[in-house]
Amino acid sequence: MGRSISGRLICLFAAVFLLNSACFALELDLSVDEEIRKNYNPTKLEQQNLPPLPKTTGSQSKTITTQPKPAQSQNQTTTTAPPKNVPSAPDPVVKKVNKDLPGSTVTKNDFTAIKIKKGTKFRVKSSSVVSDYLHEGSKVSFTSVAPVYQKYVTIPAGAVLKASVKDVHAPQMTGNGGLVVLVLESVSFNGKTYSAHGKVTKANHKKIFVNNIKGKRQYWKGVANQVDKGEKFYQKTRKTSTKLSNNPIGAIISPVPTIVGIAAYGVNFVLSPVISIGYKGGRISIPAGSEFEFKVQEDVFLSL
Protein backbone atom coordinates (compact mmCIF):
# COMPACT_ATOMS: atom_id res chain seq x y z
CA MET A 1 0.00 0.00 0.00
CA GLY A 2 2.82 2.38 0.90
CA ARG A 3 4.64 1.50 -2.33
CA SER A 4 1.62 2.47 -4.49
CA ILE A 5 1.29 5.82 -2.77
CA SER A 6 4.96 6.57 -3.34
CA GLY A 7 4.67 5.64 -7.01
CA ARG A 8 1.76 7.98 -7.50
CA LEU A 9 3.65 10.81 -5.91
CA ILE A 10 6.61 10.25 -8.18
CA CYS A 11 4.40 10.37 -11.32
CA LEU A 12 2.70 13.54 -10.11
CA PHE A 13 6.06 15.16 -9.48
CA ALA A 14 7.33 14.26 -12.95
CA ALA A 15 4.20 15.67 -14.61
CA VAL A 16 4.47 18.99 -12.77
CA PHE A 17 8.15 19.19 -13.72
CA LEU A 18 7.46 18.63 -17.42
CA LEU A 19 4.67 21.19 -17.60
CA ASN A 20 6.86 23.81 -16.06
CA SER A 21 9.79 22.98 -18.39
CA ALA A 22 10.84 25.65 -21.01
CA CYS A 23 10.83 23.24 -23.93
CA PHE A 24 7.13 22.64 -23.47
CA ALA A 25 6.21 26.26 -23.05
CA LEU A 26 3.95 27.55 -25.88
CA GLU A 27 4.53 31.05 -27.05
CA LEU A 28 2.08 32.30 -29.71
CA ASP A 29 3.30 34.74 -32.38
CA LEU A 30 0.42 37.11 -32.98
CA SER A 31 2.31 39.43 -35.38
CA VAL A 32 1.09 37.50 -38.43
CA ASP A 33 -2.51 37.91 -37.37
CA GLU A 34 -1.95 41.61 -36.97
CA GLU A 35 -0.69 41.95 -40.59
CA ILE A 36 -3.67 40.04 -41.90
CA ARG A 37 -6.09 42.28 -40.03
CA LYS A 38 -4.46 45.39 -41.58
CA ASN A 39 -4.75 44.20 -45.20
CA TYR A 40 -7.88 42.09 -45.11
CA ASN A 41 -11.23 42.32 -43.49
CA PRO A 42 -11.72 38.95 -41.84
CA THR A 43 -15.49 39.23 -42.11
CA LYS A 44 -15.43 39.85 -45.86
CA LEU A 45 -12.45 37.74 -46.81
CA GLU A 46 -14.43 35.38 -49.03
CA GLN A 47 -15.97 38.25 -51.08
CA GLN A 48 -12.72 40.16 -51.68
CA ASN A 49 -10.29 39.51 -54.48
CA LEU A 50 -6.88 38.45 -53.47
CA PRO A 51 -4.05 40.82 -54.41
CA PRO A 52 -1.96 39.90 -57.44
CA LEU A 53 0.94 37.57 -56.93
CA PRO A 54 4.35 39.15 -56.74
CA LYS A 55 6.34 39.15 -59.98
CA THR A 56 9.33 36.89 -60.23
CA THR A 57 12.65 37.95 -61.63
CA GLY A 58 14.49 36.25 -64.52
CA SER A 59 16.88 34.60 -62.17
CA GLN A 60 14.12 32.61 -60.64
CA SER A 61 13.43 29.27 -62.12
CA LYS A 62 10.39 28.95 -64.33
CA THR A 63 7.92 26.20 -63.71
CA ILE A 64 6.43 24.59 -66.78
CA THR A 65 3.22 22.75 -66.40
CA THR A 66 2.71 19.90 -68.76
CA GLN A 67 -0.64 18.47 -69.48
CA PRO A 68 -0.82 14.72 -69.64
CA LYS A 69 -1.54 13.31 -73.07
CA PRO A 70 -4.91 11.67 -73.43
CA ALA A 71 -4.68 7.96 -73.16
CA GLN A 72 -5.38 6.11 -76.41
CA SER A 73 -7.84 3.34 -76.45
CA GLN A 74 -6.66 -0.15 -77.14
CA ASN A 75 -8.60 -0.30 -80.43
CA GLN A 76 -6.88 2.80 -81.85
CA THR A 77 -3.61 2.37 -83.73
CA THR A 78 -1.04 5.04 -84.34
CA THR A 79 -0.21 5.71 -87.97
CA THR A 80 2.82 7.66 -89.05
CA ALA A 81 2.70 9.44 -92.36
CA PRO A 82 5.53 8.48 -94.71
CA PRO A 83 8.01 11.15 -95.70
CA LYS A 84 7.08 13.17 -98.74
CA ASN A 85 10.26 12.53 -100.69
CA VAL A 86 10.98 8.82 -100.59
CA PRO A 87 13.86 7.72 -102.85
CA SER A 88 12.55 5.14 -105.29
CA ALA A 89 14.59 2.19 -106.50
CA PRO A 90 15.89 2.54 -110.07
CA ASP A 91 14.12 0.56 -112.75
CA PRO A 92 15.94 -2.62 -113.81
CA VAL A 93 17.87 -2.34 -117.03
CA VAL A 94 16.83 -5.00 -119.53
CA LYS A 95 19.30 -5.57 -122.33
CA LYS A 96 18.05 -6.80 -125.67
CA VAL A 97 19.87 -8.53 -128.45
CA ASN A 98 20.04 -6.32 -131.52
CA LYS A 99 19.44 -9.14 -133.94
CA ASP A 100 16.54 -9.86 -136.26
CA LEU A 101 15.33 -13.41 -136.41
CA PRO A 102 13.43 -13.78 -139.69
CA GLY A 103 10.91 -16.57 -140.00
CA SER A 104 10.60 -16.98 -136.23
CA THR A 105 8.17 -15.99 -133.51
CA VAL A 106 11.09 -14.37 -131.65
CA THR A 107 12.02 -10.79 -132.60
CA LYS A 108 14.76 -8.43 -131.54
CA ASN A 109 12.31 -6.75 -129.15
CA ASP A 110 12.17 -9.89 -127.03
CA PHE A 111 14.57 -10.28 -124.13
CA THR A 112 17.05 -12.91 -125.29
CA ALA A 113 19.80 -13.92 -122.92
CA ILE A 114 20.12 -17.62 -123.71
CA LYS A 115 21.55 -19.01 -126.90
CA ILE A 116 22.39 -22.27 -128.57
CA LYS A 117 26.01 -21.95 -129.59
CA LYS A 118 27.24 -22.33 -133.13
CA GLY A 119 28.47 -25.86 -133.75
CA THR A 120 25.82 -27.57 -131.62
CA LYS A 121 24.70 -30.88 -133.13
CA PHE A 122 21.25 -32.46 -133.13
CA ARG A 123 20.61 -36.17 -133.64
CA VAL A 124 17.27 -36.53 -135.37
CA LYS A 125 15.09 -38.95 -137.29
CA SER A 126 13.31 -38.08 -140.51
CA SER A 127 9.53 -37.94 -140.54
CA SER A 128 9.30 -38.59 -144.30
CA VAL A 129 11.32 -39.96 -147.20
CA VAL A 130 14.31 -37.90 -148.28
CA SER A 131 14.94 -38.47 -151.99
CA ASP A 132 15.97 -36.71 -155.18
CA TYR A 133 12.31 -36.77 -156.23
CA LEU A 134 11.70 -33.77 -153.96
CA HIS A 135 11.39 -30.27 -155.39
CA GLU A 136 13.45 -27.26 -154.50
CA GLY A 137 11.80 -25.44 -151.57
CA SER A 138 10.12 -28.55 -150.18
CA LYS A 139 9.96 -28.81 -146.37
CA VAL A 140 11.16 -31.86 -144.45
CA SER A 141 10.54 -32.42 -140.71
CA PHE A 142 12.83 -34.18 -138.26
CA THR A 143 12.44 -35.15 -134.61
CA SER A 144 15.35 -35.11 -132.16
CA VAL A 145 16.15 -38.44 -130.51
CA ALA A 146 18.45 -37.15 -127.74
CA PRO A 147 18.45 -34.05 -125.52
CA VAL A 148 20.87 -31.24 -126.23
CA TYR A 149 22.49 -29.63 -123.18
CA GLN A 150 23.47 -25.97 -123.27
CA LYS A 151 24.25 -23.38 -120.62
CA TYR A 152 21.02 -22.39 -118.81
CA VAL A 153 18.84 -24.49 -121.14
CA THR A 154 18.24 -28.10 -122.13
CA ILE A 155 16.51 -28.89 -125.41
CA PRO A 156 14.60 -32.10 -124.73
CA ALA A 157 14.30 -35.07 -127.02
CA GLY A 158 11.28 -34.73 -129.26
CA ALA A 159 12.12 -31.22 -130.46
CA VAL A 160 11.00 -30.62 -134.04
CA LEU A 161 13.56 -29.44 -136.61
CA LYS A 162 12.44 -28.25 -140.02
CA ALA A 163 14.66 -28.07 -143.06
CA SER A 164 14.06 -26.93 -146.62
CA VAL A 165 15.41 -28.37 -149.84
CA LYS A 166 17.86 -25.80 -151.20
CA ASP A 167 19.05 -27.81 -154.22
CA VAL A 168 18.00 -31.12 -155.78
CA HIS A 169 18.48 -33.01 -159.04
CA ALA A 170 18.07 -36.53 -160.42
CA PRO A 171 21.01 -38.67 -161.63
CA GLN A 172 22.81 -37.06 -164.58
CA MET A 173 24.24 -38.44 -167.85
CA THR A 174 27.72 -37.41 -166.76
CA GLY A 175 27.74 -40.18 -164.20
CA ASN A 176 26.74 -37.96 -161.28
CA GLY A 177 24.17 -39.40 -158.91
CA GLY A 178 21.14 -37.64 -157.47
CA LEU A 179 21.60 -34.66 -155.16
CA VAL A 180 19.65 -33.28 -152.17
CA VAL A 181 20.82 -30.23 -150.19
CA LEU A 182 18.96 -29.64 -146.90
CA VAL A 183 19.22 -26.40 -144.90
CA LEU A 184 18.01 -26.22 -141.29
CA GLU A 185 15.52 -23.38 -140.80
CA SER A 186 13.93 -23.69 -137.36
CA VAL A 187 13.90 -25.54 -134.04
CA SER A 188 10.66 -25.93 -132.06
CA PHE A 189 10.29 -27.07 -128.45
CA ASN A 190 8.20 -26.17 -125.40
CA GLY A 191 5.61 -24.59 -127.65
CA LYS A 192 7.97 -22.03 -129.21
CA THR A 193 9.74 -21.85 -132.57
CA TYR A 194 13.21 -20.38 -133.02
CA SER A 195 14.97 -19.44 -136.22
CA ALA A 196 18.07 -21.51 -136.92
CA HIS A 197 20.59 -22.08 -139.68
CA GLY A 198 22.42 -25.36 -140.05
CA LYS A 199 23.51 -28.16 -142.35
CA VAL A 200 23.44 -31.96 -142.53
CA THR A 201 26.60 -33.73 -141.37
CA LYS A 202 25.29 -37.32 -141.35
CA ALA A 203 22.56 -39.08 -143.31
CA ASN A 204 21.58 -42.67 -142.59
CA HIS A 205 24.78 -43.09 -140.49
CA LYS A 206 27.01 -41.90 -143.36
CA LYS A 207 29.11 -38.76 -143.24
CA ILE A 208 28.00 -35.95 -145.51
CA PHE A 209 30.46 -33.41 -146.87
CA VAL A 210 29.63 -29.86 -147.98
CA ASN A 211 25.98 -30.48 -147.02
CA ASN A 212 25.43 -32.49 -150.21
CA ILE A 213 23.55 -35.77 -149.96
CA LYS A 214 24.65 -37.45 -153.16
CA GLY A 215 23.77 -40.63 -154.97
CA LYS A 216 26.58 -42.93 -155.99
CA ARG A 217 28.69 -41.69 -158.86
CA GLN A 218 28.54 -44.28 -161.67
CA TYR A 219 31.10 -42.86 -164.09
CA TRP A 220 34.05 -44.96 -163.04
CA LYS A 221 31.78 -47.89 -162.65
CA GLY A 222 30.80 -47.37 -166.31
CA VAL A 223 34.47 -47.29 -167.31
CA ALA A 224 35.06 -50.56 -165.48
CA ASN A 225 31.99 -52.09 -167.12
CA GLN A 226 33.27 -51.15 -170.61
CA VAL A 227 36.66 -52.68 -169.88
CA ASP A 228 34.98 -55.81 -168.54
CA LYS A 229 32.94 -56.09 -171.71
CA GLY A 230 36.09 -55.97 -173.88
CA GLU A 231 37.74 -58.58 -171.68
CA LYS A 232 34.76 -60.92 -171.89
CA PHE A 233 34.73 -60.59 -175.68
CA TYR A 234 38.44 -61.38 -175.79
CA GLN A 235 37.90 -64.54 -173.65
CA LYS A 236 35.24 -65.74 -176.07
CA THR A 237 37.57 -65.26 -179.05
CA ARG A 238 40.29 -67.19 -177.23
CA LYS A 239 37.95 -70.13 -176.78
CA THR A 240 36.99 -70.00 -180.45
CA SER A 241 40.65 -70.01 -181.51
CA THR A 242 41.31 -73.04 -179.29
CA LYS A 243 38.51 -75.02 -180.94
CA LEU A 244 39.73 -74.14 -184.44
CA SER A 245 43.28 -75.19 -183.64
CA ASN A 246 42.13 -78.78 -182.96
CA ASN A 247 40.98 -79.09 -186.59
CA PRO A 248 43.74 -79.25 -189.25
CA ILE A 249 41.75 -77.02 -191.55
CA GLY A 250 40.67 -74.67 -188.78
CA ALA A 251 44.20 -74.33 -187.50
CA ILE A 252 44.92 -72.07 -190.42
CA ILE A 253 42.32 -69.46 -189.36
CA SER A 254 42.43 -70.09 -185.58
CA PRO A 255 44.48 -66.95 -184.84
CA VAL A 256 41.87 -64.69 -186.42
CA PRO A 257 39.32 -64.77 -183.55
CA THR A 258 42.04 -64.06 -181.04
CA ILE A 259 43.21 -61.05 -183.04
CA VAL A 260 39.66 -59.72 -183.24
CA GLY A 261 39.22 -60.20 -179.49
CA ILE A 262 42.42 -58.31 -178.73
CA ALA A 263 41.31 -55.46 -181.00
CA ALA A 264 37.87 -55.28 -179.35
CA TYR A 265 39.41 -55.32 -175.90
CA GLY A 266 41.74 -52.43 -176.85
CA VAL A 267 38.91 -50.37 -178.30
CA ASN A 268 36.77 -50.80 -175.19
CA PHE A 269 39.68 -49.92 -172.95
CA VAL A 270 40.49 -46.74 -174.88
CA LEU A 271 36.90 -45.59 -175.42
CA SER A 272 35.55 -46.57 -172.00
CA PRO A 273 35.98 -43.05 -170.51
CA VAL A 274 33.94 -41.59 -173.34
CA ILE A 275 31.35 -44.31 -173.46
CA SER A 276 30.83 -44.18 -169.66
CA ILE A 277 29.57 -40.60 -169.84
CA GLY A 278 26.19 -41.98 -170.76
CA TYR A 279 25.97 -43.95 -167.52
CA LYS A 280 23.70 -42.30 -164.94
CA GLY A 281 24.60 -42.15 -161.28
CA GLY A 282 22.68 -43.73 -158.43
CA ARG A 283 19.43 -42.35 -157.09
CA ILE A 284 18.82 -41.05 -153.55
CA SER A 285 16.02 -42.56 -151.49
CA ILE A 286 16.43 -42.49 -147.69
CA PRO A 287 13.36 -43.97 -145.98
CA ALA A 288 11.42 -42.26 -143.17
CA GLY A 289 12.78 -42.96 -139.70
CA SER A 290 16.40 -42.85 -140.84
CA GLU A 291 18.83 -41.06 -138.56
CA PHE A 292 20.38 -37.72 -139.54
CA GLU A 293 22.65 -35.23 -137.81
CA PHE A 294 22.31 -31.45 -138.12
CA LYS A 295 24.98 -28.95 -137.12
CA VAL A 296 24.04 -25.36 -136.22
CA GLN A 297 26.14 -22.87 -138.20
CA GLU A 298 25.01 -19.72 -136.37
CA ASP A 299 24.06 -18.94 -132.77
CA VAL A 300 20.38 -19.54 -132.07
CA PHE A 301 18.90 -17.00 -129.62
CA LEU A 302 16.15 -18.12 -127.27
CA SER A 303 13.49 -16.21 -125.35
CA LEU A 304 12.20 -18.48 -122.59
Image: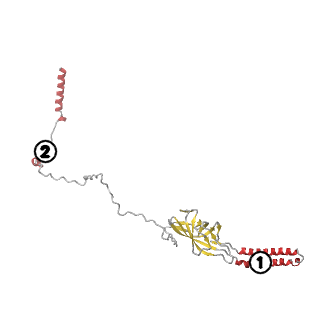
Local packing at callout 2 (Cα closer than 10 Å; few below 14, some 14-19, many 20+) is few
Q: Residue 33 has which mark? A: 2
Q: Position of residue 13 (x, y in %)?
A: 17, 27
Which quadrant of the figure has residue 148?
Answer: bottom right
Mark 1–mark 2 distance (CA, rounded to whole Å)? 169 Å
Q: Position of residue 234 (x, y in %)?
A: 80, 75
Q: State the residue lying farthest toward the right.
A: 248
Front residue of 221 and 254:
254
Which quadrant of the figure has residue 182?
Answer: bottom right
Specify the amino acid type for callout 1: Asn
Specify the amino acid type for callout 2: Asp
* Image point (12%, 45%), residue name: 34
Q: Position of residue 48 (x, y in %)?
A: 12, 51
Q: Is the C-beta separation of discs 1 and 2 under 8 Å?
A: no
Local packing at callout 1 (Cα closer than 10 Å; few below 14, some 14-19, many 20+) is many
Task: Answer left or right for 34 relative to 146.
Answer: left
Residue 2 seen in the figure:
yes
- Residue at the spot of label 1: 268
Front residue of 58 and 282:
282
Of discs 1 and 2, which sits in the foreground?
1
